[in-house]
Amino acid sequence: MLGNMSKILGQLQGLQQQLKELTVEGTAGDGLVKVMMNGQQNILAVRFDPDRTPATAPEVLGQMLVEAYHQAQLESKAKARDEFSKVTGLNISNLPGIF
């Protein structure tokens, strides 16, 4: 049993590294705003289309940034759940708040 636990812990540590290296992107405003995030939900970059940004009101840009962040976060969480399921063999898709 203890050997099994150390194997699972090793797998979970590997999963943490995989999630750190995984990259997802959320967009809003038809690509005007992009948020890049890793599988640990850390923001890696925020990009704005420089040709279209000056014509967009700051409030609208702020709303688009929030929308792009949420889109990236949802995708990151979904990929983290998938990777966790692959590593552990457990289906956690119905457990809220895990990823």
Image (cartoon, rainbow, N blue to C red):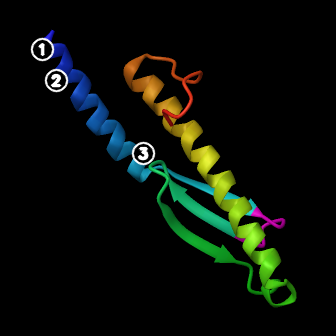
Question: Residue drawn 53% across and 34% down?
Answer: 97
Indicate the quadrant where residue 79 lies: top right
- Tell me: residue 98, above or below residue 95: below
Going by the image, does 58 lie left or right of 45? right
Question: Residue drawn 70% across and 78% down?
Answer: 48
Question: What label sits on residue 2 in the rendered view?
Answer: 1
Q: Residues within 10 Å of mark 3 (few under 14, many from 20)?
A: many
Quadrant, the N terminus: top left
Mark pair 2, 3: CA separation: 20 Å
Cβ–Cβ below 8 Å for labels 1 and 2? yes
Measured from the top left, where is residue 29 in percent x and y? 83, 67
- Tell me: residue 17, above or below residue 26: above
Mark 2, secondary structure of its residue = helix
Going by the image, does 35 lie left or right of 20? right
Mark 3, secondary structure of its residue = helix
Residue range in magenta is 28-33
Name which residue type carries label 1: Leu
Mark 1, secondary structure of its residue = helix
- Tell me: residue 22, above or below residue 87: below
Name the residue that disc number 2 marks: 6
Indicate the quadrant where residue 61 lies: bottom right
Mark pair 1, 2: CA separation: 6 Å
Q: Nearer the N terminus, badge 2 or badge 3?
A: 2
* Residue located farthest toward the top when viewing the structure as drawn: 1
Q: Nearer the N terminus, badge 3 or badge 1?
A: 1
Name which residue type carries label 2: Ser
Question: Residue drawn 52% across and 30% down?
Answer: 82
Question: Residue drawn 51% across and 18% down?
Answer: 91
Question: What label sits on residue 19 in the rendered view?
Answer: 3
Mark pair 3, 1: CA separation: 26 Å
Cβ–Cβ below 8 Å for labels 3 and 1? no
State yes or no: residue 36 in magenta. no
